[in-house]
Amino acid sequence: MHSSYADFADEEPETITEDVATQLNELLATKKVPLISSREQFHLADIIECVGTVEKHRRSLDENGVRFLLFFRQHFLHPSHHKGDLISWREMTWAFHSDSQDILADLVSRHFQGRMLWEHARESGLFMWMTDITALVSYLFP
């Protein structure tokens, strides 16, 4: 089979790593994908970037933590975020049931440049899913 993806890689990776995501995004920035609009192509690049970021943290997180992180990242890339929409209850539930809450809280904090303000905690649902009260207080009152 001959395709542009076959030209892209000598061997097919089993998963999208951060490097593969970067390379795919570079291709999406320079080439037009047929049959999709430029807006859809931009959204595809955002999704690939999210998957690459999540894959980087995959070994540290459990399945629910990975789900939360993927949709958390997508939420902040989506235009509805700029209208003040909060993360959904579904994502908060995944984080609540995650055994990796400390890592998730750290990643959420890093997303906000290491400074967790009340608005950031509200936006990410941190109050709803963090079960360790001591850790929650340490993020909000460093």
Image: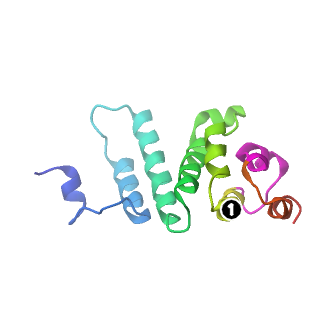
Q: Nearer the viewer, residue 79 or 65?
A: 65
Residue 5 place in picture, x, y as percent: 23, 53
Instruction: Give yes or no for residue 62 being in the magenta stretch.
Output: no
Residue 117 place in picture, x, y as percent: 82, 53
Residue 116 in the figure: left or right of residue 3: right
Q: Is residue 109 visible?
A: yes
Residue in view at x 44 percent, y 41 percent: 42
**Label 1 Cα crowd, 10 Å radius (few <14 / some 14-19 / many 20+):** few
Disc 1, SS: helix
Residue in view at x 37 percent, y 31 percent: 37
Residue 39 in the figure: left or right of residue 113: left
Most distant residue in the right direction:
141
Residue 8 in the figure: left or right of residue 120: left
> Which quadrant would residue 138 be assigned to in this image?
bottom right
Residue in view at x 62 percent, y 56 percent: 98
Q: Nearer the viewer, residue 125 or 9?
A: 125
Residue in view at x 69 percent, y 64 percent: 102
Q: Which residues are magenta?
A: 112-128
- Colour option used: rainbow
Q: Is residue 88 visible?
A: no
Most distant residue in the left direction:
1
> Which quadrant would residue 115 be assigned to in this image?
bottom right
Residue matched to label 1: 110
Instruction: Give yes or no for residue 123 being in the magenta stretch.
Output: yes
Inspect the image, locate mark 1, and give the three-letter code of the amino acid beneath it.
Answer: Arg
Residue 126 place in picture, x, y as percent: 75, 50
